[in-house]
């Protein structure tokens, strides 16, 4: 066969094609990949990071994935972590071709750059022994390509399949020349060489054609049986065992409980750039209006109303077993609509969103790597800055109707804001009291007259190693609560003041993450909530503060596994004014602290197991309470 290759300069060109054909690969298989809307991870606002590929068959128009224009339409995908709690982070999926990687090929080498002149290849010189052959293949037949950085890498080895792929490319090019009546531009010597090569590699060429036929058949099958042409379905199932010891004095340790939370998200795109997110969930956590049946109540660490506590897990709803809008009960594992949100771009840098079931965390990026109710931290304390949780901003049940915008000022600067109303669907507030001074619609009624919040976040990325988020929120509450669900003093925030007293809150906070290396990051936050009575008949104010610092590990011991160790102070009254009490009656004031550690094992792409525990010192800011330990074994399934 060598004598045929050396018969002409063009024959020599095929040897050159063999020598540098590492990125020319067959397309053997197809795989579905999830892509997330950049809401909680990056600065891409709610727009998808890659356009939705509506018709795979049109993209794979040629028999092989060779260096040509059609290849540019097949994006290279870097699969993101399939975690988060299937809020707005779930997104439109698209088809992704998977290209095999040879031992000496780097991932960045898949994308090929078609050249029209051999001079465009920076590592090919006129003095090279194969220069004339390369020049013929590039400039005469146009069936050779270089790497994206305009190199050819002619000295690397290749397989027979790679050679067959390159040969097929040149065969197709010559067929085009013949079909367009330019056969005179193809030399007889070249045709003879091609014929010999085609005979020599007939088996490999047949194998490649069979692979492509299989891919096309698979693509047709997937398109025929897909869930919807406009809607993608994502799901997350959390099953966890939770046990605790300690708590209030004279309390016996609680039994180990087994809890679950199931979420299904339907993400629909009408234009390819917008997203309508519909989320359904069911869970078996208990609590109700008085916390009955909850772990935190069994520890004696829950508020007497709405079961707020520092002993909460990350995946527990803020108001388990209760519709807080009307104080009506919700049965275990009953299906609820927890997300209904529409996101749409209106300009190159501006995206709007609106929905009747939304949360602050849907719009604002989570700066800390500990966020991820199904995958990362196991406590409610660790995942987000408390300012994001004010006014039920992360209730886990889509408490508020909200609308807002995302303004990408620059690649490193991002501004987001929203207005949320808790009971926008109720025309009037009930005149009936559930308890003295508290209506059976305790959060008010109407789009603007009930409990509401205006929140904003400025996200700044001064360097690839730093993420900084600055938050401010202004809230009005019909009753005397913070509505964070983080500590028992969340209820009756103005201690010593009636529960039915309305409040105004001004909350400020900052979160920073510093990546020391690709696998180690330091992260922390600080927050202050300034609470004032909104009634002309009451003069009272209180300040709450909280902070957290920790280290996050990625790919610890094994690729895909993560871990976290963190320490901080839960929300704690640091100052009061007027008739508000600094220390409620019967408590022994002490600064509370929270210590947590967890390790997530990524068993498969869709299953993870996270053992972890957190310890509460001076729980709820009361040294009368015993040091409390909460252990969690969480298993998360995603699909």
Image: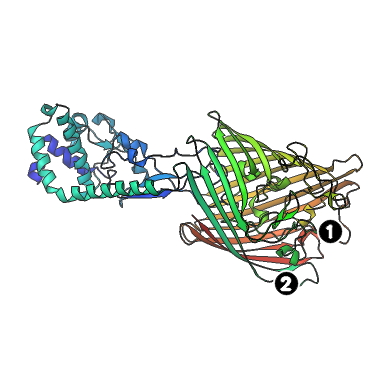
Residue linked to disc 1: 589
In the image: residue 489, left or right of residue 334: right
- Callout 1: few (<14), some (14-19), or many (20+) C-alpha neighbours within 10 Å? some
Position of residue 547 relative to residue 635, above or below, is: above
In the image: residue 18, left or right of residue 496: left
Name the mark nearer the viewer: 2 or 1: 2
For image coordinates 11% across by 35% down, the residue present is 190
Q: Position of residue 211 (x, y in %)?
A: 26, 50
Q: Position of residue 259 (x, y in %)?
A: 62, 64
For image coordinates 65% across by 54% down, the residue present is 382
Residue in front for this viewpoint, 93 or 363: 93
Q: Quadrant of residue 349?
A: top right
Instruction: Specify whether residue 165 is in view.
Output: yes
Q: Position of residue 31 (x, y in %)?
A: 38, 50
Q: Position of residue 184 (x, y in %)?
A: 10, 27
Position of residue 209 relative to residue 184, above or below, is: below
Q: CA distance from mark 2 to mark 1?
A: 23 Å
Q: Quadrant of residue 613?
A: bottom right
Residue linked to disc 2: 253
Give the mark nearer the N terminus: 2 vs 1: 2
Residue in front for this viewpoint, 434 or 570: 434
The scheme the figure's colours follow is rainbow
Instruction: Specify whether residue 158 is in view.
Output: no
Q: Are marks 2 and 1 in contact (CB under 8 Å)?
A: no
Q: Secondary structure at mark 2?
A: loop
């Amino acid at each position: 066969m060598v004598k045929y290759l050396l018969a002409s300069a063009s024959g020599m060109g095929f040897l050159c094609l063999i020598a540098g054909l590492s990125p020319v690969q067959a397309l053997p298989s197809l795989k579905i990949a999830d892509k997330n809307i950049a809401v909680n991870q990056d600065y891409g606002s709610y727009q998808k990071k890659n356009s939705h590929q509506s018709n795979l068959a049109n993209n794979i128009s040629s028999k092989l994935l060779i260096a040509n224009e059609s290849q540019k339409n097949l994006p290279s995908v870097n699969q993101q972590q399939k975690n988060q709690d299937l809020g707005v982070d779930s997104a439109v999926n698209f088809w992704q071709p998977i290209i095999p990687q040879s031992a000496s090929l780097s991932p960045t080498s898949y994308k090929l750059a078609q050249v029209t002149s051999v001079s465009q290849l920076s590592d090919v010189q006129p003095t090279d022994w194969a220069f004339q052959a390369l020049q013929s293949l590039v400039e005469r037949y146009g069936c050779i390509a270089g790497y994206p950085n305009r190199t050819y890498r002619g000295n690397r080895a290749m397989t027979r399949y790679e050679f067959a792929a390159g040969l097929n490319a040149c065969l197709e090019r010559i067929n085009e020349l013949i079909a367009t009546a330019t056969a005179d531009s193809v030399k007889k010597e070249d045709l003879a060489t091609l014929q010999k090569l085609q005979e020599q590699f007939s088996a490999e060429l047949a194998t490649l054609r069979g692979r492509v036929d299989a891919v096309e058949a698979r693509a047709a099958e997937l398109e025929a049986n897909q869930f919807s042409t406009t809607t993608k379905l994502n799901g997350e199932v959390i099953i966890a065992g939770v046990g605790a010891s300690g708590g209030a004095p004279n309390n016996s340790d609680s039994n180990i409980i087994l809890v679950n939370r199931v979420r299904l998200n339907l993400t629909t795109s009408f234009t390819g750039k917008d997203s309508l997110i519909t989320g359904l969930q069911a869970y078996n956590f208990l609590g109700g209006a008085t916390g009955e049946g909850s772990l935190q109540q069994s520890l004696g660490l829950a508020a007497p109303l709405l079961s707020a506590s520092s002993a909460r897990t990350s995946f527990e709803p803020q108001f388990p077993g209760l519709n807080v809008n009307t104080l009506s009960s919700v049965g275990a594992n009953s299906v609820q609509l927890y997300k209904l949100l529409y996101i749409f771009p209106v300009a190159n840098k501006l995206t709007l969103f609106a929905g009747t079931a939304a949360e602050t965390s849907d719009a604002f990026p989570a700066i800390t790597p500990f966020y991820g109710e199904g995958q990362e931290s196991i406590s409610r304390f660790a995942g987000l800055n408390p300012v994001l949780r004010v006014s039920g901003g992360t209730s886990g049940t889509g408490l508020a109707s909200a609308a807002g915008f995302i303004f990408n000022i620059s690649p490193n600067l991002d501004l987001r804001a929203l207005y949320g109303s808790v009971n926008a669907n109720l025309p009037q507030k009930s005149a009936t009291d559930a308890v003295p001074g508290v209506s059976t619609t305790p959060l008010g009624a109407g789009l603007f007259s009930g409990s509401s919040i205006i929140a904003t976040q400025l996200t700044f990325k001064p360097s690839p190693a730093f993420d900084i988020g600055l938050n401010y929120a202004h809230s009005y509450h019909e009753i005397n609560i913070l509505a964070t669900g983080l500590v028992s003093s969340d209820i009756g925030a103005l201690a010593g003041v009636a529960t039915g007293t309305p409040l105004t809150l001004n909350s400020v906070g900052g979160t920073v993450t510093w990546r020391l290396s690709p696998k180690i990051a330091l992260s922390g936050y600080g927050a202050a909530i300034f609470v004032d009575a909104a009634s002309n008949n009451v003069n009272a104010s209180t300040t709450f503060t909280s902070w957290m610092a920790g280290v996050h590990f990625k790919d610890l011991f094994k690729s895909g596994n993560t871990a976290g160790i963190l320490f901080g102070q839960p929300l704690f009254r640091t100052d009061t004014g007027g008739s508000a009490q600094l220390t409620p009656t019967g408590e022994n004031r002490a600064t509370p602290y929270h210590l947590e550690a967890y390790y997530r094992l990524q068993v498969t792409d869709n299953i993870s197991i996270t053992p972890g525990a957190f310890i509460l010192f001076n729980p709820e800011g009361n040294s009368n309470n015993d040091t409390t330990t909460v252990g969690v074994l969480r298993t998360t399934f995603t699909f």
